[in-house]
Amino acid sequence: MRHMTTVRRTSRRRILPLAAGLAVALTLGACGGTTQGDDDTSGDEGDDDAPAAEADPEGEYQEGLAIAMLPKSVNNPYFEVSSEGAEAVVTELGGEYEYTGPSEATASSQVDYINTLSQQAADAVLLSANDPNALCSSLDQARAAGTYVVTFDSDVDAECRDAFVSQVDGDEVGRALIEMAAEQVGGEGQIGILSATANATNQNAWIAVIEDELANNADYADIELVATVYGDDEDEKSFTETQGLLQSNPDLDAIISPTTVGIAAAARYLQGSEYQGEIALTGLGTPNQMREFVNDDTVTEFALWDPGALGELAAYAGAAMASGIITGAEGETFTAGDLGEYEIGPDGVITLGPPTRFNADNIDDFEF
Ligand code: RAM
């Protein structure tokens, strides 16, 4: 249900500079004269297809926006890189930036942060969600109070946010993961997955693609997924789960870890074990965390996108929405600084770009 109503717009004006507020008010006035505007005043928001507000593609980013990033958990180097990207954008736009979140990657612990940010009248929250559904009621309340919700990295149900900034197009991550694992085991063998949390939207979507590829792609007919374990994006738990995975599956040939926390912990375990060089390890990692494991041949190749650019794009999307440049509808466009112009796709998804594979040939070219 879209819900960017007159209420939302009114609340936006409290933080806009006078001239900008006037422009929004004028836009609202124009909308109010239409049938759509009349519908809105009834408070009945039941028409899912109704555009919530007019986008103003020629509009300027507003100054003074309060934008916060709420990651799955803080202290994860991946999200710290995303935060640096977002902070640079918000600062450049003359806004106020905050990076805040729980130390554990759970949905319940994110709820309090959403409520607080809403009470603080944040203009936009950039959220990487620990669960696709469990945050929806607090997100609904925040949105009704005037905070735009832009998910990035790990989405919620599309009804519960205004837009999702996706790192990579659709199934491409899952396909890259199984392709790298297959290459590293010579097309046959047993693989196990070391994931993040059991409810993570992003990891579960990638794992579903891996399972689908294994079931339907003839290239992988001789590869078997024997176990999936969860390190909860905690370093120590990921390390222990790696050990358990290897002990429980003596014929394992490869581990796929689609989390930067997991792959770094698994690499550290392999490095100090009898399995180094015997068990292939691939997945999603940051070059800075994985460099030493590539240099000593514990790991051959893994992938990722630029988490800093992802944070930048999320910040621009949140600012564009809070400035009225976009509403989250398919086909709208906005300019994300040096990243260039982006178009909103179906279901409010904005996609950063393809992943990069890192190996001994190129890892020193990347610094994040
Ligand atoms: C971890 C988190 C994040 C994911 C990366 C690949 O840092 O789980 O959500 O996108 O890994």
Image: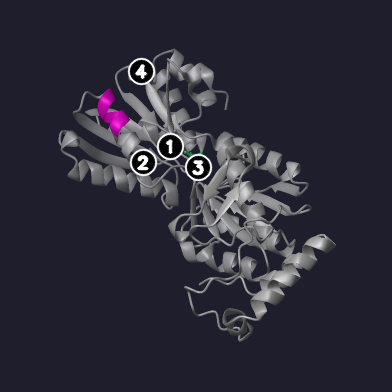
Q: Identify the residue under disc 4.
A: 276
Q: Identify the residue under disc 2.
A: 172
Query: Mark 3, mark 4: which one is toward the viewer?
Result: 3
Comparing 239 with 73, the one in front is 73
Total label count?
Answer: 4
Residue type at the position of mark 3: Leu
User: Do the numbered discs 3 and 4 sit on residues whose CB atoms are within 8 Å?
Assistant: no
Query: Mark 1, mark 4: which one is toward the viewer?
Result: 1
Comparing 307 with 256, the one in front is 307
Query: Mark 2, mark 4: which one is toward the viewer?
Result: 2
- Disc 2 to disc 4, C-alpha distance: 28 Å
Q: Identify the residue under disc 1.
A: 354
Percent across and percent down for residue 363 are: 48, 19
Q: Identify the residue under disc 3.
A: 352
Residue type at the position of mark 2: Glu
Given the current orientation, which residue lies at the most extreme top position?
296
What residue appears at the point 68 percent right and 56 percent down from the top-left corner? 59
- Disc 3 to disc 4, C-alpha distance: 34 Å
Residue 76 seen by the camera: no
- Disc 3 to disc 1, C-alpha distance: 7 Å
Q: Secondary structure at mark 2?
A: helix
Q: Judge left or right: residue 16 versus residue 40.
A: right
Instruction: Report the span colored magenta.
Output: 179-184
- Disc 2 to disc 1, C-alpha distance: 8 Å
Comparing 351 with 206, the one in front is 351
* Of pointers 2 and 1, the one earlier in the residue sequence: 2
- Label 3 neighbourhood size at 10 Å, few (<14), some (14-19), many (20+)? many
Percent across and percent down for residue 298 are: 39, 18
Q: Does residue 183 show up magenta in the picture?
A: yes
Q: Secondary structure at mark 3?
A: loop
